[in-house]
Image (cartoon, rainbow, N blue to C red):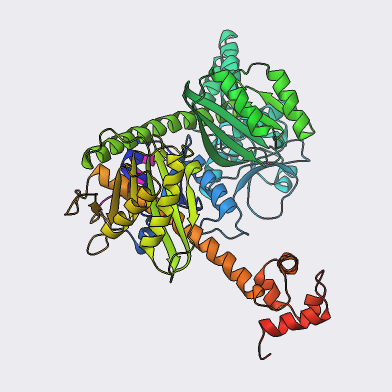
Amino acid sequence: MTAAAFEPKSLIASLPRLPGVYRMYDAAGELIYVGKAARLRDRVGSYFSSRSQAPKVAAMLKRVARIEVTVVNTETEALLLEYNLIKAHHPRYNILLRDDKSFPFIVCPSGHEFPRLVYWRGLRRPAGRYFGPFPDAGAAKETLQHLQKVFKIRNCRDAFFAHRSRPCLQHQIGRCTAPCVGLISAEDYGRDVQRAIAVLEGRSEEVNLELQRSMDAAAAGLRFEEAAQIRDQLAELQTVRAHQIASAPRSRDVDVIALSGEPGQYAISVFTVREGQGLGTVNHFTAALTEPGETLAAFVLQQYGRQAAPAEVLVNLPLPEQEALGAALAAVAGRAVRLHRPTRGLPRSWIALAEQNAQQAVRMRLGQQQAHSAAMRAVGEALALPAVPARIVCFDISHTAGEGTVASCVVFGPAGADKRAYRRYNIADVAAGDDYGAIRQALQRYGTRVAAGELARPDLVLIDGGAGQLQAAQEGLTEAQCPDLALAAVSKGPDRRAGQERLHLPGDKVARILPADSEALHLIQRIRDEAHRFAITGHRRRRAQRFRESILETVPGLGPARRRALLTHFGGLAGVLRAGVADLEKVDGVGTGMARTLYDHLHPGA
C-alpha cells in the first residue's frame, strides 16, 4: 500500500508544531518506524515533500498505512519516549540499540550524612536513589551542574571529603556550602538535598513556592543578603529542566487516562508508564452521548473489567461513584488499585500530557473525517452518482497460478474503513486462473445477501479490474437478483503506475481518466489498495493451510485426528519434517509402524 492510502496532506495539516514522537504502521498494523521531532508537523511533512528520499526511506514510505503521534513537552521527553518505544517494539526500519547500551542517570548514593549527587552510567548499580534515564551524557551533566549551583551540594568524593581541614575552591566560588568543615548543619544540608531531589522528580513548582516563602520571610526579617541569595536561587532554578515527565522512579506502574471532546466526538488518550518508563499513548474514540465523567468511568470499567489494572490509575475528570469503581478494579486485580485525579507534582504533569494528546487526537480525527467526507463527495461527482455515497465496497481477487483463489470485499463508510464489515469469499468450482468466474461468483454470493437484507446496501461497488471484470460483476449481481447497484471497475494504466488508473462504468465505451491530483481518484486508489491487501492476506493464509494439510493428507492411513496430534506435538509442519522415527513414535496414536511409514513418505530415498 502506498503512503497516499492514508491521505498524508490532511494528516500533516492536523499535526501541531510541538515536540513529540511519531509512529508509522503498515497495512497489517505492524509498527515499522518510530521517530522523534522538535516540531511534529514539519518533521512528518518532510517525508512527503517533493524532494527525493534515500532508498531506505522511500522503501519504508511505500509500506506506511497510518501514522500516530504522541505530543510531549520537550525534545528531551521525545527522545526518551522514542528510546522506550524502539526498545519495546524493535521496529524494522529503526536502527536498534544494543541491549547492553546504558543510559546516564543522576544518583544520590546512600549511607552518608552529607550525600552528594553524581553522574552515573553503567550496568552495575551502587546503592542509592536514581533519577533518569537522561537522553545523553550532556543532558545529565548539565542538569547536575545546575542543581549543584542552585543548591550548593558538594561534588567531591567521599575520601576527599573525609580529609578536608579547610573549605575548597568550590566553596570559595559559591558552589558548595562546605559541610566537610562544618560550615552548614546536617539538617540544613539535608533540606537542600531534598529540594534538589524534588526538582529531579518533577516537583519544581513545590520547590519554587518553598523558596519564595523563604525569601519573603528573610526580607520581612530584614535579612536582605539572605533574601538576595534565595532570589538568585529562584532565577537559576528556572534554567533547570525537569527531565522526568516521561520517566519516573523505576518501581512505578501507572496508567494515565484523559478524555477530551464533546458528546458524540470523544477521544480518550491512555499514557502508559511501566517500571518508571513512559511507553507512549494509545488513543481511543467513542461516539457516546453521555456526560464526560460518565463516559470516562465507562471506559475505565471496560478497560480493566477483564484485565488487571496497574497499581495506580490517574484520570483527568472526577468520576461518578469513583470509590465503587476503584473497588471494582481492585477486585479484578486481586490487590489494591489507587484510582484518583491528581492535582500537583509529577502525576499532574502526566495528566496534562495525556490531555494534550487527547485534544490533538480529536483535532486529527475531525480533520481526517472532513477530508474523507470531501473525498466521498468528489467520488459522487466524478461518477455522477445520484447522491453522495455513504457506503462504498470494493472487490479484488487473489490466487497463485489459479490455486487458493480468494475474493476480498472491503467496506468504507462515512468515517473511513469499516473493518468489522470486511468479508472474504473462498472461491470454488471455478477454472484455475479464471478471474472473471471468480468475480462473478463473489458478486453473486454478495448480491444474494444484499437482496435478502442480510448486508447493508452499498451506494457504490468498485471492482479491481477492467471491462471484463465489470461485465462479470454485472452478471453475478443479475444472478443474485440485485442488478441495480452502482458499479465501477478500476484498472491500472498502461504503465501500471499509480495515477494512471482508468475507470470503467456500465454503458461507457471509453474509460474515464481522472486528474492525478483528484480527491476522488485518491480515495478510489486507497479503497482499491485496501481490497488488494485484504485479498492477498486471505489467499496467503489459505495457501499456507492447504500446503500444511496436503502433505500429511497424502500419507496412507494417517487420518485427521493423528494429523492434528502431529502438528500440535511438533508445533507445525516444520517440526514434523525435522522429527525422526523415534520422535514420531512418541505422539499419541502414532505407533512404530505408522511412524516408519510417515517418515519414509516425508523423506523418500533417505
Counting labels gives: 0
Quadrant for the N terminus, please.
bottom left
226 and 385: which is toward the camera: 385
Q: Tell me residue 420's x, y (percent).
A: 51, 42
Q: Residue at x 39, y 61 (%)?
A: 437
Q: Residue extending furthest bottom? A: 605
Let me know if residue 392 is in the magenta part: no
When asked about the image quadrant of residue 360, the answer is top left
Q: Decide if residue 311 is on the left or right side of residue 296.
A: right
Q: Decide if residue 327 is on the left or right side of residue 222.
A: right
Let me know if residue 44 is in the magenta part: yes
Quadrant for the C terminus, please.
bottom right
Position of 594 relative to 361 (above/below): below
Which secondary structure dominates the residues rendered in magenta?
Answer: helix
Q: Tell me residue 496's x, y (percent).
A: 27, 62
Question: Which stretch did the figure color magenta?
Answer: 40-52
Q: Residue at x 50, y 45 (%)?
A: 79
Residue 184 visible in the shown view: no
Position of 303 relative to 326 (above/below): below
126 and 505: which is toward the camera: 505
When asked about the image quadrant of residue 305, the answer is top right
Q: Tell me residue 210's x, y (percent).
A: 61, 19
Q: Residue extending furthest left? A: 510
563 and 371: which is toward the camera: 563
Q: Residue at x 68, y 55 (%)?
A: 123
Q: Tell me residue 289's x, y (percent).
A: 50, 20
Q: Residue extending furthest top? A: 220
Residue 54 visible in the shown view: yes
